Image (tube, rainbow, N blue to C red):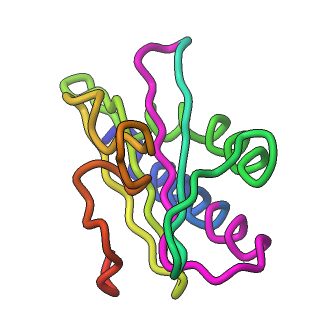
Amino acid sequence: MRDADEASQLVIELASVLIKTMQSMEKPWLRAFVRFEMTSSSNWGCNGSYETPVGVLLFDPVDDGRDLFAAVNDLGPRLRQAASTPEREVLVFLVVVDSEFNYKIDFESQDLERWKITKRNGASGIPAGLSRRFTGQL
């Protein structure tokens, strides 16, 4: 990690933004996810979803996800820079929060497809590879 202190601060800021987004929606929720990918210094983006007691919804980039995605797209390149090393460049990270304000972040440096969030082709909207049901643990 190039700068562990900065990376730690950015992770907390990202988790806080995601939790605040969920609180502002004033709906019951269990978990929320935001996935950031950066394939080069000029190409990056994010998407996300959240799990409610009745199902999983994708954040709408022009509505409930607008401010969230703006913040993640601002903080993401900085976190990628701080969390990468010359030997291991971060390609993707996934932030997961729950309604009890616990948070977790995972980094991926090889598989650009890791943790894809979609509802296409029957996918659930939960990041690929994560448990489809909330178990009380991140």
Compare residues 116 and 84 and report the one nearer the observer. Answer: 116
Residue at 44 percent of width and 31 percent of height: 37
User: In the picture, which quadrant includes the C terminus?
Assistant: bottom left
38 displayed left or right of 46:
left
Magenta segment: does it hold 38?
Answer: yes
Name the foreground residue: 135 vs 39: 135
Q: Residue reaching furthest front? A: 122
Side of 65 where 18 appears, left or right: left
Q: Percent position (x, y) of residue 13?
A: 61, 59
Snapshot quadrant of residue 27? bottom right
Q: Residue at x 19, y 28 (%)?
A: 110
Q: Position of residue 93 (x, y in %)?
A: 39, 43
**For the image shown, how many numbered marks are present on the structure?**
0
Left or right position of 72 against 38: right
> Is 42 on the left or on the right of 8, as rendered?
right
Q: Is residue 27 above or below residue 15?
A: below
Vertical placement of residue 50 versus 128, above or below: below
Q: Position of residue 66 (x, y in %)?
A: 77, 44
Q: Is residue 129 magenta?
A: no
Name the residue rendered at 31%, 53% in the picture.
Answer: 106
Quadrant (top left, top right, bottom left, bottom right) of the N terminus: top left
Measuring from the top left, give residue 123's x and y in whole percent: 35, 47
- Residue 131 in which image quadrant: bottom left
The span picked out in magenta is: 18-41
